[in-house]
Amino acid sequence: MARYAATGLENIVTTALTTALHLTRGASRRARIYDFIMGTSGTPSDNVLRWVLQRFTVAPTSTAVTPTALDPGDPASVTTAGENATVEGTQTAATELFDMGVNSRATMRWVAAPGGELVIPDTAANGIAARVSSPAYVLQADVTLHFDE
């Protein structure tokens, strides 16, 4: 099983949830997110960022990101990625897989327990989005998703 990393950002965090990075199902493959890291690149302050990982059935309109193989001998990923969404996709209601407030001065990491990976189904246009919002922080937020397929 090959493992990959995709990195993304949200240029300007707003009060509404916006997609910083998303992974969309690849051709006849399911991807499993096993690790993600989130933080900020702007000047930190004591503000909260709400991070939500949520399923979608229509991908957001975003800037393409090429996932990087963690082992350079692995083939290119068939899962696609995008960052800094300009148009939100169709989020699936009540499918939040992660929902947590994190101080903008902190970097947070989540690692799946074995068998607890977040799975993207083998269904066209489906995926998982890492979304962020804040009532006060308005600078750049960053996220990295590690996944296998």
Image (spheres, helix red, strand yellow):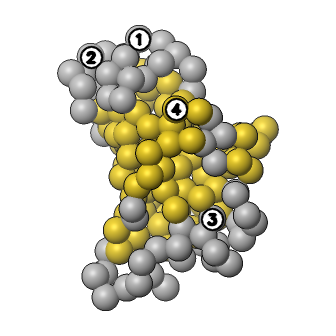
Q: Is residue 115 visible?
A: yes
Question: Crowdedness of circle 3 by 10 Å Cα count: few (<14), some, many (20+)?
Answer: many
Label 4 to label 3, Cα distance in Å?
A: 20 Å
Check if mark 1's residue and mark 2's residue have beta carbons within 8 Å.
Answer: yes
Q: Gap in Å between the C-alphas at discs 1 and 4?
A: 20 Å
| Tag 4 residue | 86
- Numbered circle sitting on residue 45: 2
Residue tagged 1 = 136
- What residue is shown at x 40% (from left), y 55% (from top)? 65
Quadrant in the picture for the C terminus: bottom right
Residue extending farthest to the bottom is 73
Q: Cα distance, mark 2 to mark 3? A: 36 Å
Going 37% across and 16% down the picture, which residue do you hit?
Answer: 137
Work out how far the residue at label 4 is from the one at label 2, CA to CA, in angstroms.
Answer: 25 Å
Question: Could you tell me which residue is drawn at 76 percent across and 43 percent down?
Answer: 92
Q: What amino acid is labelled 3 in the image?
A: Arg
The residue wearing badge 3 is 25
Say which of 143 and 86 sits in front: 86
Residue 139 is situated, as x and y percent measured from the top left of the image, at 32, 22
